[in-house]
Image (cartoon, rainbow, N blue to C red):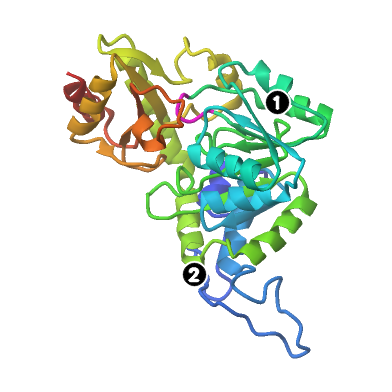
Amino acid sequence: MKLHPATRAAQALHHIDNKTGGVSPALELSSTFARDGDYQPRQSYIYGRDGGSTVKLLEALVADLDEAPAALAFSSGMAAITTLFEILKAGDHLLLSRVMYHGTLNWARHLAENRGVTLDLFDPARPETLAEALTPQTRLVWLETPVNPTWDVLDIATAAAACRNVGARLAVDSTAAPPCTTQPLTLGADIVFHSATKYMGGHSDLVAGTLAFREPALAERLTGLRSLRGTIIAPFDAWLLIRGLRTLFLRFERASTNALTIAKHFDGHPKVAKVLYPGLPAHPGHEVAKAQMTGGFGGMLSLLMDSEETAARVVRTTRLWLPATSLGGVESLIEHRKPIEGPQSEVAPELLRLSTGIEDVGDLMEDLAQAIG
């Protein structure tokens, strides 16, 4: 019987502890592991920097949900990104989106300035510019969809085909579209990244990142790099992340329902110039989103207010929406995004980024309404 991924997630791959019969995975904290009587490793790891039973279960669960042969877990999203980018060498061409998570963009600029990597940026609002920017030297394309914080939607299959034409790998940051709704590898991507701090963890109590791979050999190569860089996830964080993944499908469904309700309610509000949410039929990427995001459009939306002053006032006066950085948790967060990203950011100064949680949607709308006025 082939089980639905929601079932596999809820049972953590039907995990039962071999020693105790416990249905909740055990937490293995050991930093080193004894060898057997022939002085051979008892398993694939001998030291905590290489892994452990809790980390291995997490990686098996992530690989299963991302439909990948292999997955690796890291101590943060940026640890995963910077380790992956180590495969680039001087002269290699790296292609990213002009608007995206600013930490990834800043690291790419660092590589261009200090490592001899050639960097170009495409316009996510004009998806055709991705293919136009590819060259024979392109080795890695990093694509976010939906794009943070404008929530433009990019067609993964189309991007993957363009990358294959020049021999480039396509990595998809699917943080805002976790495996309960989008499967980048089945759409042709080579690598899928998640800031697991967000939807996958879901409770704002851990920092982690994951990479899942089409190529097992690349996963093996990055396993060695992760060990050398010391960027593996800690066992307790891995245990928390397993716990979070067990409720991912339920949490994402509720957050998606709440966000769609809020988007529809405030679309056309006199102080809201535009609602950016791929679940709205008027969104330019709605049809692609419907095809790719089969489990819901997510809890992320942005409001373009009528002015920067209105945006600054709203973020100061919400009572239920928490003014904090992050996304994908059970609690609803609001950010005035431009000041967060800094002067280099191309984000509109009147943009508010909302991460919708799982609270009562009526309470969320009432609070937002009183803040907007």
User: Which residue lies most toward the bottom here?
Assistant: 37
Q: Nearer the viewer, residue 117 or 75?
A: 117
- The residue at which mark 2 appears reads as 27
Residue at left 46%, top 24%? 150
Q: Residues within 10 Å of mark 2 (few under 14, many from 20)?
A: some
Residue drawn at x 48%, y 62% is 239
Q: Nearer the viewer, residue 293 or 10?
A: 293
Q: Is residue 123 above or below residue 199?
A: above
Tag 2: amino acid: Leu
Viewer-nearest residue: 223 or 337: 337
Q: Is residue 151 above or below residue 173?
A: above
Residue 94 position, x and y percent, is: 69, 36
User: CA separation, marks 1 and 2?
Assistant: 40 Å
> Split into 4 quadrants, where in the image is the C terminus?
top left
Tell me the amino acid under the disc marked 1: Ala
Q: Based on the displayed image, in which of its 4 quarters is residue 266 positioned? A: top left
Q: Kindly report the secondary structure that dominates the magenta region of the rendered protein.
A: loop
Q: Position of residue 152 (x, y in %)?
A: 52, 22
Q: Nearer the viewer, mark 1 or mark 2?
A: 1
At which x and y percent is residue 39? 75, 87
Is residue 3 visible in the rendered image? The answer is no
Task: Indicate which disc, 1 or 2, sits on the residue closer to the N terminus.
Answer: 2
Q: Is residue 77 left or right of residue 96?
A: left
Query: What residue would you read off at disc 1?
Result: 159
Q: Which residues are magenta?
A: 146-150
SS at badge 1: helix
